[in-house]
Image (cartoon, rainbow, N blue to C red):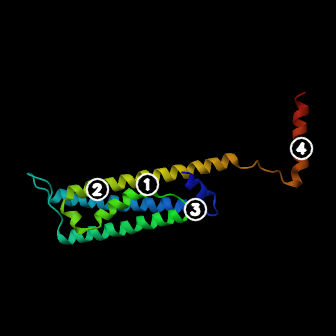
């Protein structure tokens, strides 16, 4: 969290952290979409007597390609956070899960794929939450630490007169 706060204080840091949050949300949405498609395939291929069969070779290739794209997105996000001075350690578990999904062989067991996808999605949501919490905490701190508003020089005499009139009226 300290790294996020420091990154936010740097020039343009707030915008870059917000971009990272947007990237994380897009990554989660893409994975949720892929998971939903996998669930539909699992439901359509399941037999009443057992677990769902694996994917067809073409579906496995497509799912693997899509997981590879998500993996590259997650690695890009990790690299960007490092450039900002933010420790992306919480992102490592999601990247490992995506690496496992990047292989066509992973799609032989749809139940395992669905469990792995859910774990990756949950890890990314937790990462996003911690990043957002740190960004909001820093924004609140900046509000509390901001200097009091200065009165423009042209109005200073009028403001002082106003406060004098208030204090005289209370006597």
Q: Looking at the image, is mark 4 or mark 2 earlier in the sequence?
A: 2
**Mark toward the viewer: 1 or 4:** 1
Question: Label for residue 160?
Answer: 4
Q: CA distance from mark 1 to mark 2?
A: 16 Å
Q: Looking at the image, is mark 1 or mark 4 earlier in the sequence?
A: 1
Instruction: Report the residue marked by disc 3.
Output: 15
Q: Looking at the image, is mark 1 or mark 3 earlier in the sequence?
A: 3
User: For the point 42% across and 58% down, which residue is it?
Assistant: 91
x then y, percent, for residue 33: 32, 60
Secondary structure of residue under mark 1: helix
Q: Looking at the image, is mark 4 or mark 3 earlier in the sequence?
A: 3
**Mark toward the viewer: 1 or 3:** 1
**Mark toward the viewer: 4 or 2:** 2
Q: CA distance from mark 1 to mark 4?
A: 53 Å
Instruction: Report the residue marked by disc 2.
Output: 116
Is the residue under label 4 in contact with that under label 1 (CB below 8 Å)? no
């Amino acid at each position: 969290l300290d790294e996020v706060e420091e990154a936010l204080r740097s020039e343009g840091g707030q915008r870059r952290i917000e971009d990272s949050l947007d990237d994380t949300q897009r990554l989660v949405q893409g994975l949720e979409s892929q998971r939903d498609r996998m669930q539909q395939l699992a439901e359509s291929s399941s037999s009443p007597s057992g677990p769902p069969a694996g994917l067809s070779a073409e579906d496995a290739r497509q799912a693997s390609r899509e997981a590879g794209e998500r993996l590259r997105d997650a690695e890009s996000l990790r690299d960007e956070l490092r450039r900002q001075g933010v420790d992306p350690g919480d992102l490592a578990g999601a990247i490992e899960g995506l690496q496992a999904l990047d292989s066509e062989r992973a799609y032989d067991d749809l139940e395992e794929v669905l469990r792995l996808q859910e774990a990756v999605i949950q890890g990314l949501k937790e990462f996003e939450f911690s990043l957002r919490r740190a960004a909001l905490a820093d924004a609140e701190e900046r509000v509390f630490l901001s200097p009091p508003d200065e009165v423009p020089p042209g109005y200073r005499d009028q403001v002082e007169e106003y406060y004098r009139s208030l204090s005289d009226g209370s006597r």
